Image: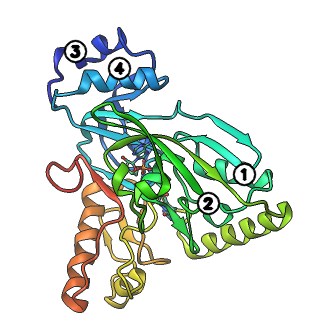
Amino acid sequence: MIELPAGLTAEALRAQIRGEILENEPLKDRTTYRIGGPARLLICPKDLEDLQRLNALMEGCGVPRFILGGGANVLVSDAGFSGIVVHLKNFNTLEFQGSKVTAGAGLVLDAFVSTCLKRRLAGLERLSGIPGTLGGALRMNAGAFDAEISDHLVTVECMDFEGNHRVLSKSEVRFAYRQAPVIRDSYILGATFDFPDGDGEALFIVREEILARRYERQPWQYPSAGSVFKRPPGYYTGKLIEDLGLKGVRIGRAQISPKHAGIIINLGGAKAADVLGLIRLAQAGVLERYGVNLELEQELIGFNGIGKI
Ligand SMILES: Cc1cc2nc3c(=O)[nH]c(=O)nc-3n(C[C@H](O)[C@H](O)[C@H](O)COP(=O)(O)OP(=O)(O)OC[C@H]3O[C@@H](n4cnc5c(N)ncnc54)[C@H](O)[C@@H]3O)c2cc1C
């Protein structure tokens, strides 16, 4: 565990930050893999002013930082995260003005989707059932069934780690497949959308179809973080892994799903090291047999030098 600078201990921060501050908070309960050690500190700033103050206190300290949404696309190491996790659950505003919607990054994505559909706003129905928050979806440019969260986006509100607060247009963010490069190292605070009108009943029929297809294809009974790898152009990741005979292979309590080989599941009590072992096994096999580099879609957190942080 790192020693936090005097100004960044929980006690010192509580004198300045109004939001919740948790020490040694288990991340296992905050990720859909249900895996991961504790975060040294987990902080939920109350509002923008609180976040700005926290960010200024962190500046130049060299303490690692990670912004956690719903934890649906991350693998946290068994040792946990030796730094500050910022969780923006309090950025949860939702305002409708005709076809225009202003939404906070901390909203649960699927609840946001369903609320928009109830208001007969079309465009998000094919994203039904994607776990996580709106902030995480924007950061990942989450998508499914030929739709992406950025499709009807107008602007993204964010703040970079230098504290610059900006509202960027969709084109400025340069969204691409499962990435949003310009806001990669920023706190994503919220977004505005402009949705076309839809037929309420028809939108919910599509939603139900999508949820049924997800249920049929994915191993919902087990904790996972969805697709482990990005889809390499011209290939289906699940098929590549399946053709290698790796479907159903286990390391410890982690398993390459027998239902969908592109997903790794936690059979109960899996370690991050087990999941990482399966990731490396699939990557090495696919590279050797097909010459295809499987790039991780999921982010590795707290692995000391491997992955993002
Ligand atoms: C069963 C299952 C099915 C899935 N199906 C799909 C699918 O069909 N399509 C798809 O695209 N994904 C899918 N996923 C993956 C996941 O749901 C998406 O990537 C989702 O958008 C992640 O959101 P999150 O809030 O959980 O982000 P997290 O996992 O918490 O974080 C992911 C990344 O976003 C960053 N981040 C999160 N919030 C913010 C913020 N407010 N500001 C800045 N950065 C932030 C994190 O730092 C991290 O880099 C699936 C996952 C599961 C478990």
How dense is the environment of label 4, judged by Cα within 10 Å: few (below 14), some, or many (20 and up)? some
Among the two numbered marks 2 and 1 on one chain, the one whose residue lies closer to the N terminus: 1
Residue that appears at 72% across and 41% down: 96
Give amino acid for label 1: Cys
Query: What percent of the width, then of the height, locates residue 49?
Result: 44, 21
Residue in view at x 79 percent, y 63 percent: 198
Ligand 1 quadrant assignment? bottom left
Q: Which residue is mark 2?
A: 129
- Identified by mark 3, the residue type is Gly
Whole-number angstrom distance, CA of label 4 to CA of label 1:
33 Å
Tell me if residue 247 comes above or below residue 3 in the rendering.
below
Q: Are marks 2 and 3 in contact (CB under 8 Å)?
A: no
Q: Can you identify the residue that label 3 sits on?
A: 7
Compute the Cα span from label 3 to label 4.
12 Å
Mark seen at residue 116: 1
The CA distance from mark 2 to mark 3 is 41 Å
Q: Secondary structure at mark 4?
A: helix
Q: Is residue 118 left or right of residue 143?
A: right
Q: Is mark 2 within 8 Å of ligand 1?
A: yes
Asked whether the residues under the numbered discs 3 and 4 touch, taking CB atoms below 8 Å apart as contact, a structural biologist would say no
